[in-house]
Amino acid sequence: MYPRKPLSYREQLARLNAYLGRARTDLRRKYDEFFGATKGRRDCPLEVQIRHRAVDHALSTVKLLEACVQEVQRQEAMFYAPFKPGDRIEVGRHEGGTFETFLVVDVLPDKKTLYSYECVALTRSGAMYKRGGSVRIWPRASSTIRASEAPLNADGRWESEYFRRCAETSRIMSIHRGDMSLFEAKEALLGGVHYRRKDILDPPPLDGVSE
């Protein structure tokens, strides 16, 4: 089968959100049917078990669709963001002030600014700070974000390439391939499952992939 051209980000989001709406309606219907089958003092145990399984399956579908919508939103944000995961940036938050150097580890969607950066500060030696975690940086009129030429040591170069490859791999697997192995199921705190994107670095090659 020849490689098929994917829809635009907007079109993919529209299709996924429409599907998600139908899946949520189906989940509510299955919940109603389950409670209808168990509201009496007597029931059919096998029917109850099958309906319970149908609810679990419908709920899993909704959670997976929600993860898919979030991933396409992330890919759209990454497309429009000037800087990508693995890039070094300098951020000055006050006019005339000093600049801080960061490594972009991810690009996240934002309703107001379309995209924002998840970053980790770089040490003077050129590696990610191991303490303090990541920070979220938004493109705003009150701050300046520009490319940085700060040096990277061996660890910093590996970290930069790692996040760059993760971003490229997730784009191929989500936008072009629809590869569901991009997501993994995790147990939710209150029961059930939710899905998260995995950091997968080496998908099968896809010839002729372009934006």
Image (cartoon, rainbow, N blue to C red):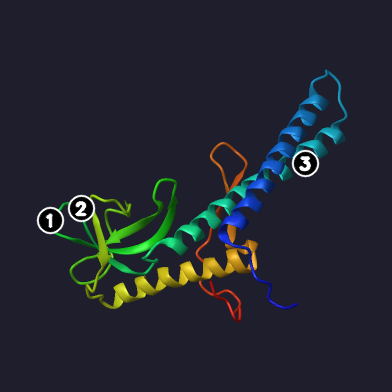
Amino acid type, callout 3: Ala
Q: Badge 1 is on which residue?
A: 97
Amino acid type, callout 2: Arg
For the residue labelled by badge 3, is the local secondary structure a helix, a strand or a loop?
A: helix
Q: Residues within 10 Å of mark 2 (few under 14, many from 20)?
A: some
Q: Pick whichever of labels 3 and 1 is earlier in the sequence.
A: 3
Query: In which quadrant of the rendered view does residue 68 lie?
Result: bottom right
The answer to whether one can see residue 38 in this image is yes
For the residue labelled by badge 2, is the local secondary structure a helix, a strand or a loop?
A: loop
Mark 2 and mark 1: Cα distance apart in space: 7 Å
For the residue labelled by badge 1, is the local secondary structure a helix, a strand or a loop?
A: loop
Depth-wise, is mark 2 or mark 3 nearer the camera?
2
Q: Residue at x 40, y 62 (%)?
A: 81
Depth-wise, is mark 3 or mark 1 nearer the camera?
1
The image's mark for residue 9 is none
Mark 3 and mark 1: Cα distance apart in space: 59 Å
Q: Badge 2 is on which residue?
A: 93
Q: Residue furthest left?
A: 96
The image's mark for residue 54 is 3
Mark 2 and mark 3 in contact? Answer it, CB < 8 Å: no
Q: How many marks?
A: 3
